[in-house]
Amino acid sequence: MANSKLKCVTIQAVTEHTATVIFLHGSGGTGNHWTSMVKDFQRDPRLHNVKFVLPHATSRTMVIPGREAPMPLWFDMHAETLEPDEVDILQSVADIEALITFEAECLPSSSRLVLGGFSQGGTMSVLTGIIGEQKLGGVSVLSGRIALSRPKLQSMAKPHIRETPILWAHGTDDTVMKYSLCEDGMDFLVSDLGVAQDTNEGLIHIRYEGLKHTILPEELDDLKEWIVKRVGKEIAESAV
């Protein structure tokens, strides 16, 4: 059995478990911060079959002045350029992949597992979807970015990313993960990796006018509906 060193909050499916969602928090957060979202989602009978796993990132010290205290981070930044640290990113991808492998052992296939996240968590979700070994049922990116160079990712990308449904949601007034990073990331998926755009089995983008680096109820509703389409109960009953 595969092992993951990530500690997690696990919320079991309400009924028979036929799908799993792994959701990754942002910098300085923990999986606990997303339990209220999961409880709201599980009020919908269409998601009663879904188990939710909310991992905690490894504690790291961020180089940004004023934030030197250790905190849960999926990756640190380089002090000079403020670009994401590649070593941290690849280690976090390995940790997330181990968790995916562990959770997928309880499912008919890894296509019954959806990976998502907010901010740094969204960044790690799309990176894991691109370079991870297993084809997932979907990847959601809330206010995230592509954090490695295009040539690096192109050389590491797995062919199955072209067939992986991706939801990318982002606010136009985000000053932490600027909207231009969202545009660059989606352009990379479509232009460099060949991901289809505006299709249920490809990339879907939702743009929130005036939204800063946060989540609003409308965005959670959109995420929930997208998860239902990917692994919700109606899909599960016809697929397993």
Image: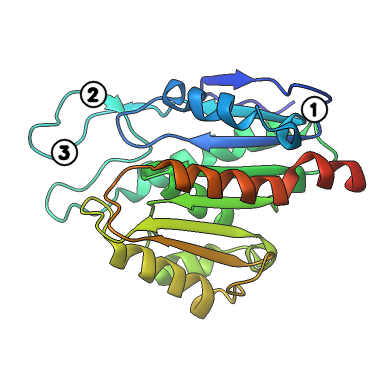
Marks 3 and 1, how far apart at CA: 41 Å
Task: Give the residue pinned by disc 3.
Answer: 63
Residue type at mark 3 is Val
**Callout 1: helix, strand or loop?**
loop
- Which residue corresponds to the image point at 55% horizontal and 73% vertical from the top-left? 193
| Category of crowding for the residue at label 3, using alpha-carbon neighbours closer than 10 angstroms: few (below 14), some (14–19), many (at least 20) | some
Q: Are marks 1 and 2 in contact (CB under 8 Å)?
A: no
Q: Which mark, residue 154?
A: none
- Return the x and y of residue 199 as percentages of the image width and height: 65, 70
Q: Measured along the vertical axis of the image, is residue 219 above or below residue 95? A: below
Number of other residues with Cα within 10 Å of mark 2, as a class: few under 14, some 14 to 19, many 20 or more: few
The numbered mark, 2 or 3, whose residue comes first in the sequence reads: 3
Q: Nearer the viewer, residue 233 or 97?
A: 233
- Precedes in sequence: disc 1 or disc 2: 1
- Residue 133, visible in the rendered structure: no
- Image vertical order of residue 111 relative to residue 154, above or below: above
Q: Which mark is residue 70?
A: 2
Q: Distance of mark 1 from mark 2, alpha carbons?
A: 36 Å
Query: For mark 1, what is the residue?
Result: 17
Residue type at numbered disc 2: Pro
State the image quarter where residue 147 is shown. Answer: bottom left
Q: Identity of the amino acid at label 1?
A: His
Q: Is residue 20 left or right of residue 148?
A: right
Q: List x then y, in percent, for residue 90.
A: 44, 46
Q: Identify the residue at image location x=60%, y=20%.
A: 10
Viewer-nearest of discs 1 and 2: 1
Q: Nearer the viewer, mark 3 or mark 1?
A: 1
